[in-house]
Amino acid sequence: MKDAKLALESLCVHAGQPEEAAGPVVVPIYASSTFKFRDADHGAALFKGEEKGYIYTRMLNPTVQALEDCIARLEGGAFGLACGSGMAATHTAIAAHVSTGDHVICSESVYGPTSTLLTTVLSRFGIEYSLVDTSSLDAVKAAFRPGTKLVFVESPGNPTLVISDIAAIASLAHERGALLVVDNTFMSPVLQRPLELGADIVVHSLTKFLNGHADVVGGVIVVKDEERYALVRKTLNHLGGVLPPLEAFLVHRGIKTLHLRVERQCDNAQRVAGFLEPHPKVAWVRYPGLESHPQHELGKRQMKGPGAMISFELKGGIEAGRTMMNSTRLCQLAVSLGGVESLIQHPASMTHAGMSAENRLKAGITDGLVRLSIGIEAAADIIADLDRALESIAG
């Protein structure tokens, strides 16, 4: 299977399926924390890296490795590293490549805890940072310093859905000796493959589209070559933020329907965005599939579809948004995204509450912004639910 030239739809079903003596169709769950050696020399050879094999599940596990291989193939990378959460993946990817005094450029419209990691945690260890509008190449260029080692881009940005030109930013970074890390959580490899656009590393929250069923927390890092894999693997092993085998099994199972789910979610989201944009109680809508999106043309070139995330603001501001969120029934009021169920939430008071008010506003995260993650329900039912909720707003 590894050498087969399969379409992405087929890879979602078959990638990462190792040959097992018993011939299972589904990857087994290896629940063992440790693995025995044939003899003392074998154990020593594994620790020295002279032989490949399994020692201890924090270091490598067959079930987890099958998932890592699967996602690496979907992303067009060489190796994957599964992590205990999306933030474990982000932390590991950054920590493996920066030291005290180094500088990181990061999208200002980014998952809230990613910004908080830089501003309140890594900054205590002397890591410098700049939060910039990475949808503006001029802003990215101006942010580089002699000590810039890494650029971290989330595109589309969370939650404003601004789109950054990954290929152009990769060129800027490489010309200046920096790496580009892209958080591809909002798109999944079905819709966007950053490594093919020049990125050096891709990270995901496995919790979201890749798993798709709101029952696993996890993350993954994908790299292009064995040398970088060895560096990041060493960092992950020592930080310890690894994914357990059961969670790896569940995510691998979820990926089998990834392409179908994302296709349905994109179709639903396009219909929902089309309903919201002309609504008299809606001030504005940001969705890459709408021609009104500021980077609509870039999105069409860079992405294979507009995704399932929508952000919008009501004319009544935060109070109108609160009324609407409290009035939905099908769209559940909960954080997270990318699952089969539609979710609605308020970033300023929820997912991005850890960011300073100044940084939120600079990133375009207004107090009235509402974020929708569109699921696989019937589009007519999602729209009817939102329509009822909008009707509950006075005026």
Image (cartoon, rainbow, N blue to C red):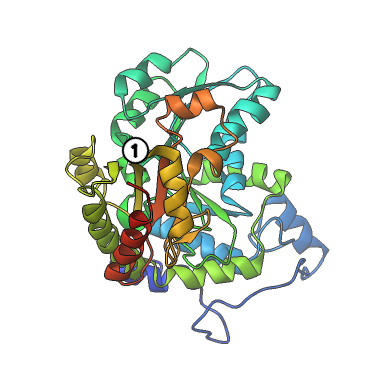
Give the image quarter of residue 1. Answer: bottom left
Q: Given the current orientation, which residue lies at the most extreme right position?
A: 40
Q: Secondary structure at mark 1?
A: loop
| Count of numbered marks | 1
Is 202 in front, or is 390?
Answer: 390
Residue visible at 51% across and 80% down in the picture: 26
Q: Position of residue 137 (x, y in %)?
A: 30, 23
Is 189 in front, or is 376?
Answer: 376
Is 203 in front, or is 386?
Answer: 386
Q: Position of residue 163 (x, y in %)?
A: 31, 37
Q: Given the current orientation, which residue lies at the most extreme bottom position?
A: 22
Classify 10 Å Cα crowding around label 1: few (below 14), some (14-19), many (20 and above).
some
* Residue 272, placed above or below residue 102: below
Is 387 in front, or is 120?
Answer: 387
On the picture, is 319 further left or further right than 355? left
Residue 171 visible (yes or no): yes
Residue visible at 34% across and 54% down in the picture: 390
* Residue 319, placed above or below residue 177: below
Residue visible at 64% across and 54% down in the picture: 84
Residue visible at 42% across and 17% down in the picture: 143
Q: Position of residue 280 (x, y in %)?
A: 23, 46
Q: Residue flagged by tag 1: what amino acid is it? A: Gly
Kindly identify which residue carries mark 1.
198
Residue 308 visible (yes or no): no
On the picture, is 103 further left or further right than 30? left
Q: Position of residue 389 (x, y in %)?
A: 38, 58
